[in-house]
Image: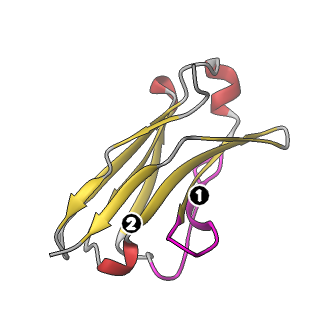
Amino acid sequence: QRQLVESGGGLVQPGGSLRLSCKSPRTILSVFSISNLGWYRQAPGKERDLVASITNTGTTNYAPSVKGRFTISRDNSKRTVFLQMNGLAPDDTAVYFCNRNSSGQDYWGQGTQVTVSS
C-alpha cells in the first residue's frame, strides 16, 4: 500500500477548475499532523517544481505562477491535503505529485495527470 495516494486529476478546459486530493492512509494521525505537506508538478521534459506547500501550523506558500488561482489546504483528521485549482491554463498541464515531509524524510505519491486543453 502506497504512502500517499493522489486523486482528482483529469482533463479540463482553459479557465476550468479541479480539486486534487492526497490521502496518507498509512500515516498515524500524530505524525501526519506535524508533517509539512506540498504539491509539486512536472511537465514533460521539465523538472519537478513546487506548486504550493503548507506547514504543520498552516502557513502556506505558492509558486508565483499559481498565486491567486490555487489554494492548498489540509484536513489532519482525514490525513489529507488538497489543492484547489481555479482559472486553469494550458501551462498548468503536468503530472501533479503530493509530498509529505516529516523529520526530514520525504514521501511521494504516484502522481495524477492534469491536462488543460480545449
Quarter holding the N terminus is top right
| Residue 114 locus on image (x, y percent) | 35, 59
Location of residue 35 with respect to 41 vertically, above or below:
above
What residue would you read off at disc 1? Answer: 53
| Residue 116 locus on image (x, y percent) | 26, 70
What residue would you read off at disc 2? Answer: 70
Location of residue 76 with respect to 86 vertically, above or below:
above
- The residue lying furthest to the front in this view is 45
Q: Secondary structure at mark 2?
A: strand
| Residue 47 locus on image (x, y percent) | 64, 72
Q: Residue at x 37, y 48 (%)?
A: 20
Q: Secondary structure at mark 1?
A: strand
Q: In the image, 45: left or right of 93?
A: right
Q: Quadrant of residue 63?
A: bottom right
**Magenta stretch, residue numbers:** 42-65
Quarter holding the C terminus is bottom left
Neighbour tally class for label 2: few under 14, some 14-19, many 20 plus, Cα within 10 Å? many
Q: Quadrant of residue 68?
A: bottom left
| Label annotation for residue 73 | none
Is the Cβ of the residue at disc 2 closer than 8 Å to that at disc 1? no
> Distance of mark 2 from mark 1, alpha carbons?
11 Å
Q: Residue at x 63, y 22 (%)?
A: 27
Is 116 one of the magenta-colored residues?
Answer: no
Residue type highlighted by circle 1? Ser
Location of residue 66 with respect to 38 vertically, above or below:
below
Residue type highlighted by circle 2? Phe
Q: Residue at x 38, y 73 (%)?
A: 92
Between 54 and 63, which is closer to the camera in this rendering?
63
Location of residue 101 with respect to 71 vertically, above or below:
above
Q: In the image, 36: left or right of 51?
A: right
